[in-house]
Image (tube, helix red, strand yellow):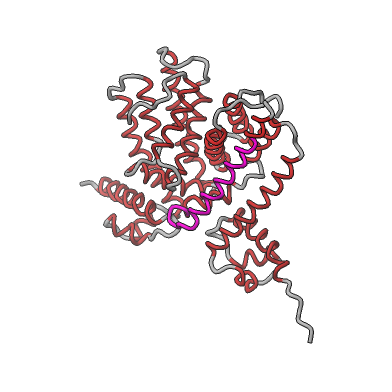
Amino acid sequence: MSPRPRLDHVRRPAILAAAAEVIRERGLENTRVADVAERAGTSAPSILYWFESKGELLTVALGFAEERFYEALERELAGIEDARERMVRIVAGGAGEGDYDAALWMELWPRALRDPELAAMRAELDQRWRRTIADVVRYGKTRGEFEVRDPDGFAALLSSLLDGLAVQIALKDTDVTPQRARELSLRFAERELGCELRAVA
Amino acid sequence: MTEAAVADGARERILAAAVERIASDGIDDVRIARIAMDAGVSTSLVHYHFETREALLEQALEYSFELAGDVRIGDEEGAAPTHTRRLAAMVDQCLPYPGELERDWILWVELWLRAVRHAELRPTAARLYARMRRWFAEAIAAGAAAGEFDKGADPQRTADRVLALCDGFGVRALLGDVPIERAREEVWALIAEQLGVDPAPPPG
């Protein structure tokens, strides 16, 4: 008798995408396995096959969403030669208009306070983002477009600034719209990098 | 004691207990019965004052913010020798130093998360942030008027940037990712650059 084809490995991305979507919409607290199953078009047991707990669901869904984010970002950056344009793209990615998953990210923060594994994951993702920024800065330096002494220092500052602004955007604060956040960040980057960015944006 | 006074006392005790418990357990896991016990009231009285968990979180944050705010205002009225030192003290009030500030911070982070989906929490957050923005912008404008800070930098824009940076670095400090002194230095470095003051932060 021929073995039944194993479809589970095909289903995993679909399940993770569904989980990320539902968590983003409802928050982890209000996400039930049944919700994810429904969104993925599968059954609860196949979800539970992959995840031991809801906490794991969050970690894996977030990891998945971040992978997709970086895939798309790296593809885009590769198609942009101008370093300033790359930096503008980075800021747009971080200043919360759709791409940057503030909603998922924020699920991590309070939980990272009490769960060392989530804290470690958050730190790792944070590092990756800073590295991505620093890489663009170094690229710009070699091209003579940016003048900055410490690319890693700049990356730490910009990412923290973007994080803080992302909170305001997520809270739908009328004083800090995505547009204003982008402007504030671009002006900041301009000063640090010694170049014009807003004209490029 | 009048009935009203007793009632007020109970509400405040509940809030004080809620601040502690939410900070240590998180708003999702906190047990209302525990808060009630700490406050020396019945669970039904807690529910009477705070219909939902979100309402309890919101008001606990506001209560905690006001308490921390008393310390902040106190700094203002006390003898702040220079605008620079005053601004540095204000930054310190916005970072998660152990104790009341750290506890206040934890509640903020809990609120951030839930305000994404519970629109009714946003007005409180907006109101408290607006106060912080105004507080910083006024201090920066005052320093500029006194000739201590560069006049070039727009006070509101600088204030917004400082707060965002405090939040961004503060979260990392809260989570133990960076030492809090580093967070302080980084925020001050931004201020120094925007306002033309000494990049070494005044002693805390």
Q: Main secondary structure of the magenta part?
A: helix
Q: Which of B41/B195 is in front?
A: B195
Residue that lies at the very extreme toward the left in this rendered image:
B1
Q: Tell me what residue is drawn at x 58 percent, y 67 percent.
A: A51
Tell me: residue A200, above or below residue A27: above
Q: Position of residue A56 (x, y in %)?
A: 55, 63
Q: Position of residue B187 (x, y in %)?
A: 45, 31
Residue that lies at the very extreme toward the bottom in this rendered image:
A1
**In the displayed structure, does residue B131 sit left or right of residue B21?**
right
Q: Which of B125/B190 is in front?
A: B190
Q: Tell me what residue is drawn at x 56 percent, y 49 percent.
A: A125
Residue that lies at the very extreme toward the right in this rendered image:
A2
- Counting the numbered discs, the total is 0
Q: Is residue B76 magenta?
A: no
Q: Quarter holding the C terminus of chain B?
A: top left
Q: Tell me what residue is drawn at x 35 percent, y 62 percent.
A: B33
Tell me: residue A158, above or below residue A13: above
Q: Tell me what residue is drawn at x 50 percent, y 56 percent.
A: A118
Question: What is the quadrant of residue A182 in the picture?
Answer: top right
Which contiguous range is marked in magenta?
A112-137
**In the displayed structure, does residue B19 sit left or right of residue A109?**
left
Tell me: residue A20, above or below residue B144: below
Q: Is residue A115 magenta?
A: yes
Q: Which of B201/B49 is in front?
A: B201
Tell me: residue A179, above or below residue A50: above
